[in-house]
Image (spheres, rainbow, N blue to C red):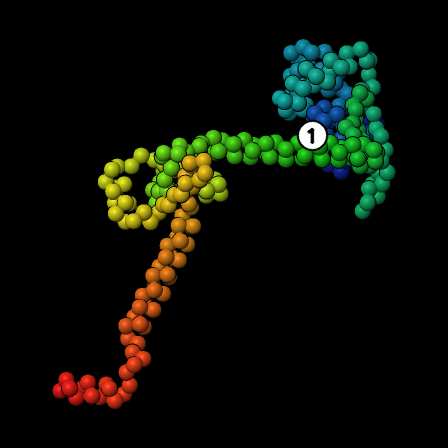
Amino acid sequence: MRHQRSGKKLGRDSAHRKALYSNLAGALIEHGRIQTTEAKAKAVKPFAEKMITLGKRGDLHARRQALAALRSNDVVHQLFSEVAPRFADRPGGYTRIVRLGPRPGDAAAMVYLELVDHEPAASPLALSRAQREAAERRQARERRRAERRRAAARRRERARLEAAAGPVPVDQKQVLPDTVRRAAIPVGTQALLRRRKIAHTIPERADQQGERDQDGGAHQRSDAHDDGSDVVLSERETDAIEEKDDERGRRQHGEGSKERHRMPSGLCGSTLVDEGAHLR
């Protein structure tokens, strides 16, 4: 007979049951609310309230008793420093049970065991349509602001590259070979200079200038504007002009060779035979 034997065994031995109470009460103190079966909630409810009463006492002996039952220093610290002071003026009844209905599968009665002052956070599913739309509008505004910040950063970088390139003095404008230009100018500035067709100059030795003069100025050509400024051609335009000059030279050379090998109109076959006989 079970005379003078309170509590439920819950299908567990004493060690397993004590561990279950310790874990459930620790989770309740840490989170403020737990979801479990109705039988376990009714069994652990008195145990959890006793722990809160120990926290309200606050002396060393009560702390040691709570530590022996809860088996966690962090939970005991939170109990004595945060949870128990909230119930200092409450003589008891620190928890409540909220029924949720049967559990799918075995139809066990499920409940919430929570502290009476617990305020659950709003679930995304519980938000109204207006709240969801407001949240979506805030997210859209944040995305637009981020895009504007990125565009402003790109404009500042472009302005910095243009300032780094700077205007080239008229007397120093010259087109450098591609290898020299790449070695002297950063990659971003190279793209900017190619896009704007601006030549970037660096100091060179006199012998390099003489070699370029001897080569015929293959990499530069400048003409005079009405205002006296020079026009600096890009490398692509210089190559196109050189190809056209080469093609014109080949065409002229071919026409001259044809004229040299063309037969005079006043001569005929008999004349050539007579001249050959005379030579013999």
Q: Residue furthest front?
A: 266
How many dots with numbers?
1
Task: Name the one closer to the observer, 50 or 207.
Answer: 207
Q: Position of residue 68 (x, y in %)?
A: 65, 22
- Name the residue carrying label 1: 23
Q: Residues within 10 Å of mark 1 (few under 14, many from 20)?
A: some
Residue drawn at point x = 45 percent, y = 35 percent: 227
In front of the other: 27 or 134: 134
* Residue ID at (59%, 32%): 152
Q: Nearer the viewer, residue 157 or 55?
A: 157
Judge from the rendering whether residue 224 lies leftward or rightward of residue 49; answer left or right: left
- Between residues 116 and 269, which one lies in front from this camera angle? 269
Residue 167 falls in image quadrant:
top left
Judged left or right of residue 226, residue 91 is right
* Residue at image location 82% in from the left, 42% down from the top: 103
| Residue 147 can be seen in this image | yes
Where is residue 149? Give x, y as percent: 61, 31
Name the secondary structure under disc 1.
Answer: helix
Residue 27 in the image: above or below residue 217 = above
Residue at image point 52% right, 32% down: 159
Position of residue 177 in the picture relative to residue 197 (left or right):
left
Residue located farthest toward the left when viewing the structure as drawn: 280
Does any portion of residue 115 appear in the rendered image? no
In the picture, the quarter occupied by the N terminus is top right
Residue 40 percent coordinates (x, y):
78, 33
User: Residue 71 in the image: x percent, y percent?
Assistant: 64, 25
Quarter holding the C terminus?
Answer: bottom left
The amino acid marked with disc number 1 is Asn
Task: Tell me: residue 225, above or below residue 252.
Answer: above
